[in-house]
Every structure is written in structure tokens, then in C-alpha cells.
Amino acid sequence: MRASKRLANGTIRRFLCAPKFVQGPSALAVLLAAVSGACGNPLTPDGNLLPPDAHPLAPTSCGPVPEQTVPVGGSVSVRVCFSDENGDPVSLSASSSRGAVAAFVADDSTVTLKGVYPGTTTVTVMARDPGGLSGTVSFSVWVPRVVPLADGYNPAWSPDGSRIAFMSRPPGADDGSIFVMNVDRGGVTRLTNSIGDQYPVWSPDGSRIAFMSGQRDSSDIYLVNADGSGATNLTDNPGFDGRPAWSPDGSRIAFMSQRDGNYEIYVMNADGSGATNLTNNPGNEMNPAWSPAGARIAYNAFPAGNSDIYVMNADGSGVTRLTSHPRSEAYPAWSPDGKRLAFGPLADTYGDIYAMNADGSGASSRLTKDFAQGFGPVWSPDGARIAFRSLRRNDYPRLSVSVVNADGSGEASLALGANGPTWSPDGQKIVFDCNSGICLVDLSERGHR
Ligand SMILES: [Ca+2]
Ligand SMILES: [Ca+2]
Ligand SMILES: [Ca+2]
């Protein structure tokens, strides 16, 4: 004997008139209930019928589940919480409203969702107790659409949002040149005629592009106008020069150089003149990041065998060590308001993304639950979110491009097999290296069906 009742919140609970409730005077009550069509109302221990909305044996949810994001081909595990008022264990089953997500239950408290194809869907998890009483919780799941844009690597969005610079191999070439694609109108233009060019970085006004070129041990920083004219080697020396970072006013470029045998942070004028060693220290100083106001430069160094975050004035004075944890912190990234520094693990190692006050006050806070790997965190233009390359437990060993809110909430993987995220200036899109070249995810599609 079963009966269904649609509750005000839209969930359906089916109540079984289980034999264990039928004893003594309650047998008569069950019979009466069945005759009256009210079998769905369970009984109190003394055999009395309960009011329609007082079902003490129904598994109840412990709260709503936030919206989830699952990459195509990847999966995410969601903990759901049901409690049975009389302590019975509950079993879970799950279903999705359409095929975008395959939902399946991994154990008695975790639902694992698999991204099948892009879209937004609703997943409903049902809990059932041994007596057959049940409860449900529903939440939406977004599987981002990954749009291939071009054959290449190292995408960088122009400050006005209209173009993306990237590295690509010209036909027949073993290595890459710098190209630019027009985001709005389509079309790809080759900017440099040299081979071995990579990692383009736009000047703040969008008129020029700095990039690296040459063999790893001796690479140099070059500059080219955004129309492809005027390509110039700015550093021309036998040591490694790389990781160019524009000063916010576009007048100078900070970079890391190994020209004196170990890595230093240098700064030069944007025409390559006036190169100055800011750190001048026997250890390695790497990965400069210019503060949004232009007064400070953050970087990472290795004072005790592991990497720590430092900040100094843009003239090299006022060096301040910000972290001293035994793990390695690297790739500092300024929040757009200049108040926070996010950082991640060294390249080819694993660790979480953290953020701390840029003045060193307070403790750093861990933002991610799944490990990151790669070239560090990238703030969204509005400072609300951080993109990073992630190694998620669910998708191990596949890497993905992920985002997390600046407060550590809302961590989500957008695409598998992805690296090197860069934000559109409006903060709505992320482009990145993907298996097929350069790909895009439009965050504004979240929630669209
Ligand atoms: Ca060099
Ligand atoms: Ca050094
Ligand atoms: Ca450290």
C-alpha cells in the first residue's frame, strides 16, 4: 500500500504502510487509513494517525546544495545530507532532468556527477529509508561549452577586448610566431616573422606586445607593435630573459633574467634602455608582478630552499618577505585593487591557491580545495574571481582550468586538458590552451538552458 503526496515545495514523498508499524491498536488505524485513502500518513508509536505534514520517518535534507559546475568529460562529487528522524540509514539515488549530466551515486552521502555535453540541467537526489519513506533535494548543474578559437598556445586578451594575441606554428615551422586574432570580426594575422616566439603580453594601452623568443637558456624579451611593425629585441644577451610584466603606465617592463648566473628581477624602459638589476642577490628571484598603482613589484625567491613571496618598491628598495612557509609559494598576482596578493605552487608542483593582504598583515587564506598546478592564479578584472590551472581529485590525472571566488567559495572546473587562462576585460569569458589549440568558455552562459 503506497500513497504519494506532492508537498508545497514540489518534492514528492511516498509513504509505505510498513508492517512494522502495524501492531496492536495501530492495525485498526492502518485499516481505517487505507479505507479512508490516507494510508500515506504514518502512525505515531501508539498507533495514532499523524497530521498530513508531520512525517517523522521521512529522510529530510540538511539544506540546499549550491549550483554545481562540471567540465565536459569530467566529474564532480557533491555531498548531500539527509537525516532520518528515527536514525535509519538512507540510500540515495539521483537523476538529471536532461542528458547534460549523468548523475550517479557513489556512496551513502556523495553524488558524483559526470559532464556529458554542455548545458544547464537540474539534478534531483532522492533519499529513501528502509521503511520506504523518502525525501529529495534538487540543484542545478552547469556543463560549460568549450569553444575552439584557433590553433595555437599562450592566449592573451588585448586590453580593449577586441583581439587575442597568441603563439602559433606557421606552416612547416618547428616553432611558433606571434599571431593576433580578431575576437569580434574573426580573422587571424601573423605579427612576427621570427620563429621561436611565445608568451605575448599586451602593453596596458594595447599598442604594443612584449613576448619571449629564443632558446630557453638564452631567450630574450622582444617588443612588437600591435600592427606587426617594429619588432625589437629588448634584452639581447646570452642569459635567460623572460616573464615580462608591464608597469601600469606602460613606460617600463619588469622581467626575470639569468644573465649574471642566477635569476634576478630586472626593470627596463619599454624601449629596452636602462635595464637595472633590482634584486642583485645570489639566490633566484623570479616572476615579477607589478602592483596596479605601479609603486611595488611582487616576486618569489628562495631564501631557505623553498620559495616565498616578496614585495619591493619598484626601484628595488624596501624588500619585504611576505611568506615563510616550508612549502613553496610562487607566482604572486595582485588583485585589481592592489590590496591582495594571490599565489600558487611552483610550476610542475602541486599546491593550493592562497591569497593574503599585500601589506603582509593578517594570515594568508587558502582558496582552493583541489590542487593547482601551473603558472599561478589570474584575477578577474573585477577582482571577484581567480582563474587557475587545477589538478582536481575527481579528474586526476587530467588538468583543468578552474575558477574560484576571491573568498574561496564557488570553486569550479570549466574545462579538462586546459592551461593558461586569461580573462576577457569584461570578465565574462576565459580563453586558455586546450587540447585542440586555444579555447573559450563564456561564463555568462551559466544558467542558460
Ligand atoms: Ca637573453
Ligand atoms: Ca638573484
Ligand atoms: Ca615558502
Image (cartoon, rainbow, N blue to C red):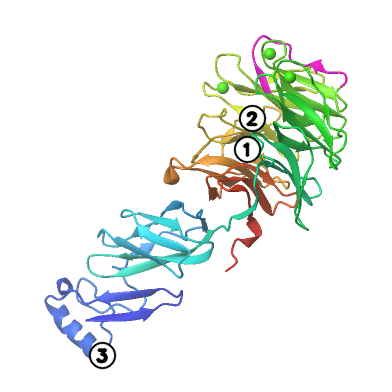
| Cα distance between the residues tagged 1 and 3 | 64 Å
Could you tell me residue 440's position as x and y percent?
64, 52
Camera-nearest residue between 369 and 219: 219
From this viewpoint, which residue is outermost toward the front?
172
Of 191 and 164, which appears nearest the observer? Answer: 191
Whether label 2 touches label 3, CB < 8 Å: no
**Are dots 2 and 1 in contact, CB under 8 Å?**
yes
Q: Residues within 10 Å of mark 1 (few under 14, many from 20)?
A: many
Identify whether 445 is placed above or below 284.
Answer: below
In primary-sequence order, the first of circles 2 and 1 is 2
Residue 90 lies within the magenta run: no
Q: Quadrant of residue 322?
A: top right
Which amino acid, mark 2? Tyr
Q: Which residues are magenta?
A: 273-286
- Residue name at image x 88 percent, y 30 percent: 251
Q: Which residue is mark 2?
A: 331
- Mark 3 vs ligand 3: CB below 8 Å: no
The location of residue 79, given as percent across then percent down, is 40, 53
- Residue named by callout 3: 36
Residue 368 visible in the displayed image: no
Q: Say which residue label 1 marks.
A: 377
Residue 274 belongs to the span the image colors magenta: yes
For numbered disc 2, what is the local secondary structure? Answer: strand
Name the amino acid type tagged 3: Ser
- Quarter of the image with the N terminus is bottom left
Establish whether ligand 3 lies closer than 8 Å to the Cβ of label 2. no
- Residue at figure coordinates x 64%, y 56% from the top left: 443
Residue furthest toward the left?
A: 24
Q: Is mark 1 within 8 Å of ligand 3?
A: no
